């Protein structure tokens, strides 16, 4: 086995420009050369993020993978903060890390400099968390390492300086956008579908320009006309009627128009694709219907994306941005008329009851609480106007709404059906769930705790040695098959199955060995987490009520999962709603961890869970007290 230190290498560039591409390759060359010329290091893996900002930690997929491989847990949390400027709460996405308990796969991370690692002050926290698991970051150009405390002081200054640079750049960009808005200067990019972007050049005597691309302009026109109802594919056939897009005396304006899914199907039927040759997506269509540029308007400074370190989870239009719209057909060659854009805007207001472009779900009583039993995605709220007795609210699976029934054909559920279920839950059902289901959950966790305590107290050294010998024997046999297949130059199907089977056996044996050889301290740490869940269950049982208010219910219930089948002929769908309590979700997450404790079967504890369901809360307290004493004794014996 090699005595060299395993290292990970990380490189990043923020854009896909030619200049940044050179930087990307230069980083690769420097890191490769350093490892190859080192007698102390061997490369574990390269981790790379290309075209990703240094401030957006939550967008950097491979950066997150690298941290997980280093033994950290990586989470993207949505937190609510109070925005002083807006005078209201808003959501922000926060990138957090902490120890996972897993053994790091390497010992050091090599990076060119601090700006390539990240331009985010949170990176100091990440460096500290990495130090806790004894993984250190070396910045080669700076000859600094997070391992030395004196270097961390310098790194802290440099990282804060990188963050200041990004903030300053963000401020300058915002100022540039404001000046462009004030002076009517067109701001666009080369990727805007339908147009060729022509910058104004060095002399700055003329404005930037957008000239439409005929083959793409037809697609944009089709989208707007379908949505506004001035062209119906199914009724008029595949040939589009001639149109001047002025809309003043249009004879087709009396049609209802079609929705986004029908537009997508029509574009696919016509063979229209994106520039990358893919089918259009629903969100892409929404963005196009929202873009005033297609009607010849300069709409600079329309969206508020937040600041560089407080990015919004989605961009929202400024409330007064329409006051600053400027019709400039010299700078933007219009693809459609302002009248057609207004028709679509009005149509959207009729259908959604909101301003064009704010494609944000309605805030309802059950927002984020209803989930699909088929695909697991959240349900979103809609309003149907097809009923004679007035509009009705209902929830539909997000995947079904966006991608159609071919992807998910989950049943819809009306607001009143959820209201009735919640009312029933508040009156009696929640009390029953807490009394029975939570006692059963307590029993399962208690069984796991007892089984784990027994495992720690009764570790068999002979069993450990026997497992190690069996793993070695099976590994040698597996290597023989692999070497034989390698010499033959091809692997038969039978040999593949043998290799797969033997590899599965070895994995199971290693899991059993890990269970036997894991440190008692690790077991005790897991037991303490499970004891905390049991304590929370007892608190819930002690405070149970016959009747709950809806607010009290949603403090206990995390979500409702919808099951059922859609009925034809306008019949009310038959649904089943299954609640998940917060305490249950926490327990499931804990018991589902991929670690040694989950490998211990509950039946080894010899406990009848059904008996626990019949016990009083005071009796459950006594059971918990007994295992707490046993855990204290384990701590004395092994810690």
Image: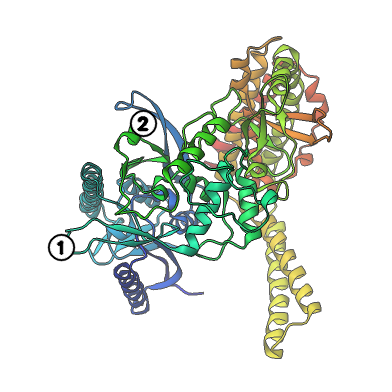
In the rendered image, residue 10, in percent from the top left (x then y), is placed at 38, 64
- Residues 275 and 575: in front is 275
Mark 1 vs 2, N-terminal side: 1
Q: Quarter of the image holding residue 606?
A: top right
Front-lying residue, 441 or 409: 409
- Closer-to-camera residue (237/341): 237
**Circle 1 residues within 10 Å: few <14, some 14–19, many ≥20:** few
> Left of 206 or right of it: where is 305?
right
Query: Residue at label 2?
Result: 319
Nearer to us of marks 1 and 2 is: 1
> Colour scheme in the image?
rainbow
Q: Left of 75 or right of it: where is 41?
A: left
Task: Count every numbered label the image shows and give the total.
Answer: 2
Picture residue at 32% right of the left edge, 40% below the top:
325
Q: Residue at x 54, y 26 (%)?
A: 363
Per the image, the residue denoted by label 1 is 203
Separation of marks 1 and 2 at Cα, in angstroms: 34 Å
Tell me what residue is drawn at x 48 percent, y 49 percent: 245
Q: Give the residue at the far top of this rendering.
A: 546
Position in image of residue 116 (x %, y %): 31, 60
Circle 2 SS class? loop
Q: SS class of the residue under badge 1?
A: loop
The answer to whether residue 191 is above or below residue 420 is below
262 or 326, which is in the foreground?
A: 326
- Classify mark 2: residues with Cα within 10 Å, few (<14), some (14-19) or many (20+): few
Provide residue 256's location: percent of width, then percent of height.
Answer: 62, 38
């Amino acid at each position: 086995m090699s005595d060299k230190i395993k290292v990970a290498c990380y490189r990043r560039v923020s854009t896909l420009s030619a200049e940044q591409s050179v930087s990307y390759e230069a980083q690769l060359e420097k890191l490769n050369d350093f490892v190859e010329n080192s007698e102390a290091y061997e490369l574990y893996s390269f981790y790379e993020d290309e075209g990703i900002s240094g401030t957006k930690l939550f967008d950097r997929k491979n950066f997150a993978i690298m941290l997980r491989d280093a033994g950290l847990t990586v989470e993207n949390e949505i937190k609510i903060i109070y925005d002083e400027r807006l005078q209201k709460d808003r959501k922000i996405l926060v990138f957090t890390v902490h120890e996972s308990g897993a053994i790091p796969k390497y010992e050091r991370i090599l990076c060119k400099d601090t700006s390539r690692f990240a331009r985010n002050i949170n990176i100091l926290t990440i460096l500290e968390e990495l130090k806790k698991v004894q993984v250190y970051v070396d910045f080669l150009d700076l000859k600094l390492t997070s391992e030395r405390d004196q270097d961390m002081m310098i790194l802290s200054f440099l990282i804060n300086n990188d963050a200041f640079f990004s903030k300053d750049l963000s401020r300058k960009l915002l100022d540039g956008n404001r000046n462009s808005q004030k002076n009517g200067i067109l701001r666009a990019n080369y990727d805007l579908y339908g147009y060729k972007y022509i910058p104004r050049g060095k002399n700055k005597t003329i404005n930037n320009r957008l000239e439409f691309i005929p083959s793409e302009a037809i697609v944009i026109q089709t989208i707007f006309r379908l949505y506004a109802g001035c062209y119906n594919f199914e009724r008029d056939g595949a040939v589009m009627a001639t149109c001047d897009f002025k809309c003043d005396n249009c004879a087709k304006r009396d049609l209802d128009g079609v929705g986004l899914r029908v537009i997508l199907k029509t574009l696919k039927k016509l063979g229209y694709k994106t520039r990358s040759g893919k089918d259009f997506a629903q969100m892409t269509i929404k963005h196009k219907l929202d873009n005033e540029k297609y009607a010849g308007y300069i709409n600079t400074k329309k969206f508020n994306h937040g600041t560089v370190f407080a990015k919004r989870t989605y961009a929202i239009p400024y409330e007064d941005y329409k006051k600053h719209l400027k019709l400039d057909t010299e700078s933007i060659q219009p693809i459609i008329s302002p009248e057609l854009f207004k028709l679509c805007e009005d149509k959207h207001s009729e259908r959604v009851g909101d301003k064009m472009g704010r494609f944000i779900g309605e805030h309802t009583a059950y927002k984020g609480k209803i989930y699909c039993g088929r695909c697991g995605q959240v349900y979103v709220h809609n309003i149907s106007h097809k009923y004679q007795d007035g509009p009705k609210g209902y929830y539909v699976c997000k995947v079904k709404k966006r991608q159609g029934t071919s992807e998910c054909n989950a049943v819809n559920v009306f607001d009143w059906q959820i209201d009735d279920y919640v009312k029933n839950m508040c009156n009696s059902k929640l009390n029953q769930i807490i009394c029975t289901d939570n006692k059963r959950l307590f029993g399962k966790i208690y069984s796991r705790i007892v089984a784990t305590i027994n495992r720690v107290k009764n570790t068999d050294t002979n069993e450990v040695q026997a497992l190690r010998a069996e793993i070695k024997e099976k590994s040698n046999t597996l290597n023989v098959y692999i070497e034989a297949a390698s010499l033959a130059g091809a692997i038969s199907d039978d040999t593949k199955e043998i290799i797969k089977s033997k590899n599965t056996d070895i994995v199971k044996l290693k899991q059993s060995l890990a269970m036997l050889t894991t440190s008692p301290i690790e077991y005790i740490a897991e037991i303490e987490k499970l004891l905390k869940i049991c304590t929370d269950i007892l608190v819930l049982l002690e405070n149970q009520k016959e009747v709950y208010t809806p607010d009290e219910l949603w403090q206990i219930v995390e979500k409702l999962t919808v099951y059922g089948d859609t009925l034809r002929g306008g019949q009310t769908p038959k649904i089943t709603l299954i609640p998940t309590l917060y305490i249950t979700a926490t327990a499931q997450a804990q018991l589902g961890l991929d670690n040694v404790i989950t490998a211990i079967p509950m039946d080894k504890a010899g406990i009848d869970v059904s008996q626990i369901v019949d016990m009083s809360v005071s009796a459950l307290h006594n059971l918990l007290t007994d295992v707490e004493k046993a855990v204290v004794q384990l701590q004395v014996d092994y810690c």
